[in-house]
Amino acid sequence: MDRHDTYDKRNRRLWIGLAAPGAIWLLVLFVAPFYVMLSVAGGGINEFFQTVVPVWNPLHWSSFNFSAVWRDIVGAGAYLGPPALRTLLYTAIATAISLAVAYPVAYFVSRYAGERKGLFLVLLIAPFWVSYMMRMLAWIDLLQQGGFFNSALSFLGLPGNTDWLGGKSVTVIMGLVYGYIPYLILVLYAYLDRIDQRLLEAARDLGLSKWRTFWSVLIPLSKPAIIAGCFITALPMVGDYFTNQLLSAAPGTTMLGNAIEGQLDAPGQTGQGAVLALMLLVVLLIPMVYYVISTARASREMA
Amino acid sequence: MHPREGWSEGGVRSGREPREDAVSRRQLLKAGAGLALGGMLAGCSSTNPAAGSGVPPLPRQDRPVKWPIYTDNKPIAAGMAPEEGATLQLYNWVAYINEAVIKSFCKKHNCKYSLTTYNTMEEALAKMASGKLKVDVFFPTVAVLGQLIAAKLIRPLNQSYIPNMANVWPDYRDPFYDQRSQYTTPYSIYTSGMAWRKDKVNLSPSWDMPWQGAKYSGKVAVLDDYRETISLALMRGGNFDLNTTNTPLIRAAGKSLQQLATLTNVRIDNNDYTDIPTGKAWIHHAWSGDMASSYQYLPKGTSIDTLGYWFPANRKGPVANDLMVNATGGANPVLAHKFINYMLDVDNALNNYSYVGYMQPLTEVTPARLTSEKLLPPQLASTVVLPDYFRRGLFQLELPPAADAVWESTWSSFSNGL
């Protein structure tokens, strides 16, 4: 009895020990900042200096910032509608383009890269060696009038004097695709690589055309990866402000991330920025929950 | 409302910083904090009629303010020796001072220094107010001066330590925002005007220039700063009160900006100093100090002659200056005074200018001097601020809370593409 007890205790201690680094990490770098954000959103401002005063006790949180944001959404001077709509539109288009590009790439690497798979994987990860900001800054040079992108277009006989940086939605969408597509490829690759090749062969043997095999077998099999990959790329796109700022900066392409960033820097409005960020988080939770439920269902069906 | 907002150490501006350090005090009245502030300012012998009425005085060019000196926050005594073995604590905007100048000061006075930087005035105020930052010399904007004084975060200066005030433009010995310079000396001064590419744009510069730029769609940019850019639209409409509280006027300026967006797909950014030389923009609402160093970003083969900066000849345009003050938190008030004096020396100021691009209002810092010392190409001499600009130029100052809210919401509508 005694021995059993100590064994149990030791075992538990081991697991606690193993879980500790992750738990501490999550606590310090996610839960704590999140709580700070809540405390700022529900907090007040130092009326004298217009600086944020976080309120740590939830019982004393005020609704001031929440109602101010609500007025910005539906009130007389509401201005959050157009950026919200644009965010939705840009993210949807950019995600769709990403998927159309990423799926064939991931499929190719998982099925046909053969011995060079390692090389392709390295190439796919390579963009992460350079910081996101640097990559976007590089695009400013490439997209200039007289820059490489325009030269390449005119070489191909296309109009090569477009002012891509003059505040164009298409440039922002392209920037978003470029910035986040590696995540999608990697997720798709990891999943496609595990799909049993024999299932596809069986489908072909049983008389399905290549096309039907793709639509009726491969796509359904890779659905969880498609959903997961799209979320992983779309979520950061929704909160992105930097791409837009660097590649456009025109009012006509402002996204929610830019609106939040603007509020964080405005004296006395930091709390409202926090509220807006929290609201965005809540909205993004809906697809996240859907994702968790659908993957759980999928794994149950598989079992 | 500051050219250095959002800078990173490398001298690159990042992020979107649309609002200013000048304070939005919409909650001030609501929370009744105005009363508390009024109390703090009680006994203030201000010439500002607003003083004592529960609202802090808002200095204006035609309504100067003399700030109170509190019995528990007096200037230091004259004739003291600088602190020995000290580390001078400086708190400034990012990339807004030449460290070579600080180093030479420290060599002279056998001290060490530590330079801490901030990106927004709000951030600076928050850290100063928290009391955790022990600073000797601080470089605030005019807009926050009243708050700093009332909270006793800065100490009145003992001018006997600052003989170099004699180098400063005479107007700055008694500026409207701090009569008799009790608490401040000026740091840098700049104008807001119009920058353009002379080889690309065939228009004569004016406040209307961006609106005439329909054929340069995508190549027109305004500053990412609600006060500056709404002011631009106000001036274009012939309204030169840049601290107006007239709601219809402010709204009309906002409409005019929305019209500008339709006409030119205007961009909102503070990269005037790179956008114009690289050709990313051809017409850019700009700060003089930024444009003074813009030639350094010209690509090979593009002449300095292509760069233009305009500020109206009648001086009816935005002028602003920063301040040097002695913060109460620091342990080295004497050294702080000596440092402020050092920065007002002409050679040191020029050395600082060579790095910062923003000039100091010293009598000997003239366009001729700057160009002859090869600190500024003659083509950009229009970026130099002249003494009468201080009197005739338009200062964008702190607004009453209700009016500020109108300015901010007008900006939100424009900048979010409504």
Image: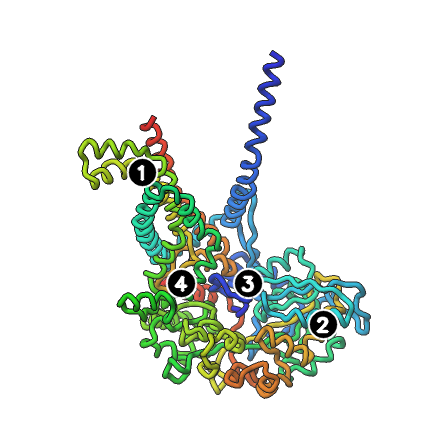
Kindly identify the amino acid type of the residue bearing the numbered disc 1.
Ser
Q: Are marks 3 and 4 on the same chain?
A: no
Which mark is in front, 1 or 2?
A: 1
Is the Cβ of the residue at disc 1 closer than 8 Å to that at disc 2? no
Give a yes or no on whether discs 1 and 2 share a subunit.
Answer: no
Which residue is more in the foreground, A202 or B389?
A202
Q: Position of residue A142 (x, y in %)?
A: 40, 65
Circle 1 is placed at which residue position? A222
Subunit that carries the residue with mark 3: B
- On the image, the x and y values in percent for residue A267 come to 52, 60
What count of labels does the image hold?
4
Earlier-in-chain disc, 4 versus 1:
1
Residue B8 marker: 3
**Residue type, mark 3 in image:** Ser
Q: In this view, does B97 lie to the left or right of A23?
A: right
Helix, strand or loop for disc 4: helix
Mark 3–mark 4 Cα distance, whole angstroms, equals 19 Å
Indicate the chain on which mark 1 is placed: A
Q: How far apart are marks 1 and 2 (CA)?
A: 66 Å
Does B9 appear above or below B312? Answer: above
> Residue A51, image x and y in percent?
56, 57
Going from N to C along the chain, the mark reached first, 2 or 3, is 3
**Answer yes or no: do the residues labelled 2 and 4 have beta carbons within 8 Å?**
no
Q: What residue type is labelled 2?
A: Ser
Most foreground residue, B393 or A11: A11
Judged from the image, the secondary structure of the residue bearing numbered disc 3 is: loop
Q: Are marks 2 and 3 on the same chain?
A: yes
Identify the residue at image location x=57%, y=23%.
A11
According to the picture, the residue beneath numbered tag 2 turns out to be: B104
Q: Are marks 4 and 1 in contact (CB under 8 Å)?
A: no
